[in-house]
Amino acid sequence: MSPWQRVDWRGMQMSLLQSQDSGRVAWAEDPARSRGRLHPEAPSATRTPFARDRDRIIHASAFRRLKEKTQVFVAHEGDHYRTRLTHSLEVAQVARSIATALRLDADLAETIALGHDLGHPPFGHAGEDELERQMGPFGGFDHNVQTFRVLTEIERQYPRFPGLNPTWETLEGIVKHNGPVQDRLDRPVWNAVVDFNAAFDLDLGGWASAEAQVAALSDDVAYNNHDVDDGLQAGLFRLEELLDVPLVGPVLHGVRSDYPDLDARLTRMEMVRRLIGVMVGDVLSETSRRAEASGVASVRDVRDLGGALVAFSPPVLEDLSRLRAFLYERMYHHWKVNRSRSQARRILAEMFALFLSEPDVLPEEWFARLNGLDSSGKARVVCDYIAGMTDRFAIEEHRRLFQLDAWN
């Protein structure tokens, strides 16, 4: 029996319908009891605090720029592949579905999902690795910290405060969605979080809310599935090569058994659709089991549990590890992907060096931010400027800076 067939879809649907009528579980976040914002604001007449955070993220310029920031492929390689924006939307959809089924606050889970990638630089992991290398002498680079800084200082839209002034719960969920961060606070790149925490304690040593954990698991659901989908579309591997891959193989066998004459495109799409369902079903089952076993009865219980409450089951977690190993071998380290990464690293390295040595070529707004800063502060401004670029803008900016004919 395939993983798809083992899921009790009728029971899950009934549970979901019942959850919409029975309110939140005791360990769900309650927007009416939010710990508020660093800069107090009058409440919205039409939205909960978490829904308001979501709307601010959607309207942020950093969110719009995700449309041409990639994860594996570079934006100019085609419009069929996922970008950080489409990925964030997919994560948000999965997160909202899981949170609703678990009777959590779906607005908060969706908000954290939409905001979790705001700090990613252009060119995916290659861009992050290069900025980490360039910023090594100046405190380092971490995309999670960069996301936090986008929300608290870099994004500038309001007259009364920098950033988006999110609620405590949204900020805590963004910075801790993958678990406690106490062991990272001695790294210089985390100074921004440490300084902020001194004014607005985010309980950095504890686990985040169940909603934040849902967002983190939804990220895993989304990227594993869309990497399989994108890898197939790019021709980096074929459907037949997935038949022996754990988790994916049984689902693919099930699709072919149900639809033996289906073409490759629809087979791929049905496989991915079912695979998402299998992973979501596993998260719901395992989380419900852990909640019952641990006896969590409040949001404080979730944070003090000593481990994740929202999780995959051990068998599925093992299967996902083997799936990732397949993707690393056949996709992430493919020579075509390596070539794009090499180009991306050179683009960012050359721009970083130029902006640092000749800061007066920065746009006026960014050049003004250098005033009065030491070398580390100036490097951070340069890093912020580059990290905010889209793939396409980074390529064009590099061309303008290093090729005279780009001005013609």
Image: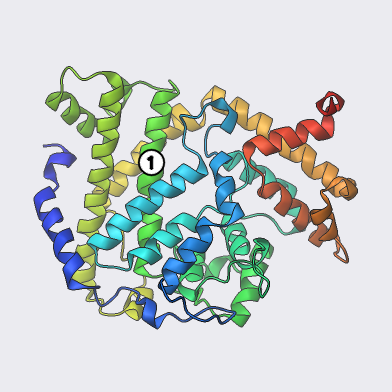
Answer with the quarter of the image where residue 263 lies. Answer: top left
Question: Looking at the image, which is closer to me, 353 or 79?
Answer: 79
State which quarter of the image contains the N terminus: top left
Query: According to the image, label 1 marks what residue?
Result: 224
Residue 106 position within the rendered picture, expressed as x and y whole percent measured from the top left: 33, 64
Q: Residue at x 23, y 60 (%)?
A: 101
Element at label 1: helix
Residue 389: % across, % down:
67, 45
Q: Residue 366, image x and y in percent? A: 79, 55
Dot 1, how many residues are within 10 Å of its Cα: few (below 14), some (14-19), or many (20+)? some
Q: Nearer the viewer, residue 382 or 181?
A: 382
How many discs mark residues in the rendered view?
1
| 349 with respect to 323 (left or right) | right
Q: Amino acid at mark 1?
A: Asn
Q: Is residue 258 left or right of residue 362?
A: left
Quadrant for the C terminus, please.
top right
* For residue 213, side relative to residue 373 (left or right): left
Task: Give the residue displayed 25% in from the left and 79% down from the top.
Answer: 297
Provide residue 113's location: percent of width, then percent of height.
43, 56
